[in-house]
Image (tube, rainbow, N blue to C red):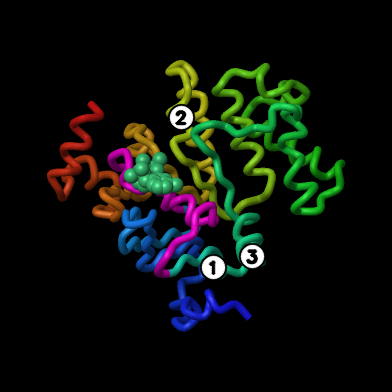
């Protein structure tokens, strides 16, 4: 049926525990001759909050983007909720519904109101009625504490408010895991806190999340694990206490030193 996929299917997925949400096994990716992901192995269980950090260019965004196939990996295996992320577009569609993603730049649709931004995917992809989608959207706008902005357009909101809308919009799809790629790094300093507070509150509710950030106080407070990447590899995957107090490698000490 699909010649490209046959090499992938030759090796069956290793059975994962029932609460595994994401499993990456020996994931490889190249951009031309440049290897951007090397032997990436990562398992994310339900309720885990994993902070990913590491130098610029180390492959953090690429790793996140491979999970919902915004980028294609070239080797190894990625499984999300028992569905293989592969050449089969049907699998990709299922995975994308289960994976919410929030980017550094909020990527709201400028010509739609806040409410319409939040209703769009549930109506088109989840087949909600407009009334259902509106109800869900308002519930999540309450959740990120900006229901009063529902009828405004993105350009009328501050950056911090827009990022909270982007978070609400992703939550409206009922994702099983949320991916955040530096959600506060494009914000003015005075707006970082309101977005971090939203993320802390999601974490406290048990939302499964993978979050690329350099906000190390946040990592210390809410991460169940900290993953450190360098040159396309995961070189540390450890609870925050150890990451901050007893880093195993000089390059992590150097990285933390630069952030101070
Ligand atoms: P990070 O998020 O850790 O800063 P990225 O995943 O964005 O790292 O990028 C990792 C490396 O891959 C960088 O060296 C970057 O220049 C390179 N890269 C990213 N996207 C592309 C692309 N589309 N084509 C070629 N190289 C890319
Ligand atoms: Mg990045």
Quadrant for residue 259, please give it: top left
Q: Position of residue 8 (x, y in %)?
A: 48, 76
Characterize the local packing of mark 3: few (<14), some (14-19) or many (20 or more) Cα atoms within 10 angstroms. few
Q: Which residues are magenta?
A: 48-76
Front label number (3 vs 2)? 3
Image quarter of the C terminus: top left
Q: Nearer the viewer, residue 189 or 70?
A: 70
Q: Residue at x 57, y 68 (%)?
A: 87
Q: Nearer the viewer, residue 134 or 18?
A: 134
Of callouts 3 and 2, which one flags the residue occurring earlier in the amino acid sequence?
3
Q: Is residue 258 left or right of residue 75?
A: left
Q: Is residue 80 magenta?
A: no
How far is disc 1 from disc 3 in space, using C-alphas?
A: 8 Å
In the picture shown, does residue 245 fall above or below 24? above
Q: Is residue 185 left or right of residue 246?
A: right
Q: Which residue is mark 2?
A: 184
In the picture, the disc for residue 86 is 1
How far is disc 2 from disc 1 in space, using C-alphas?
A: 31 Å
Judged from the image, the secondary structure of the residue bearing numbered disc 3 is: helix
Q: Is residue 87 left or right of residue 185?
A: right
Judged from the image, the secondary structure of the residue bearing numbered disc 2 is: loop
Front label number (2 vs 1)? 1
In the picture shown, does residue 183 fall above or below 46? above
């Amino acid at each position: 049926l699909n010649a490209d996929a046959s090499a992938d299917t030759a090796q069956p997925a290793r059975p994962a525990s029932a609460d595994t949400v994401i499993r990456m096994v020996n994931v490889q990716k190249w951009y031309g001759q440049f290897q951007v992901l090397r032997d990436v192995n990562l398992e994310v269980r339900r309720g885990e909050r994993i902070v990913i950090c590491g130098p610029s260019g180390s492959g953090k965004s690429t790793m996140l983007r491979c999970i919902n196939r915004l980028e294609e990996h070239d080797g190894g295996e990625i499984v999300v909720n028992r569905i293989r992320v592969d050449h089969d577009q049907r699998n990709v569609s299922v995975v994308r519904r289960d994976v919410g993603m929030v980017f550094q730049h909020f990527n709201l649709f400028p010509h739609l109101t806040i409410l319409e931004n939040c209703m769009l995917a549930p109506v088109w992809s989840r087949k909600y009625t407009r009334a259902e989608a509106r109800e869900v959207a308002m519930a999540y706008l309450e959740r990120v504490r900006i229901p009063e902005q529902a009828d405004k357009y993105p350009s009328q909101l501050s950056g911090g408010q827009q990022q909270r809308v982007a978070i609400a919009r992703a939550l409206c799809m009922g994702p099983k895991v949320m991916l955040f790629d530096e959600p506060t790094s494009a914000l003015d300093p005075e707006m970082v806190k309101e977005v971090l507070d939203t993320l802390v509150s999601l974490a406290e509710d048990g939302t499964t999340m993978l979050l690329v950030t350099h906000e190390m106080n946040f990592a210390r407070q809410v991460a169940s694990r900290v993953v450190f990447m360098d040159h396309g590899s995961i070189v540390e995957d450890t609870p925050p206490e150890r990451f901050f107090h007893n880093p195993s490698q000089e390059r992590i000490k150097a990285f933390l030193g630069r952030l101070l």
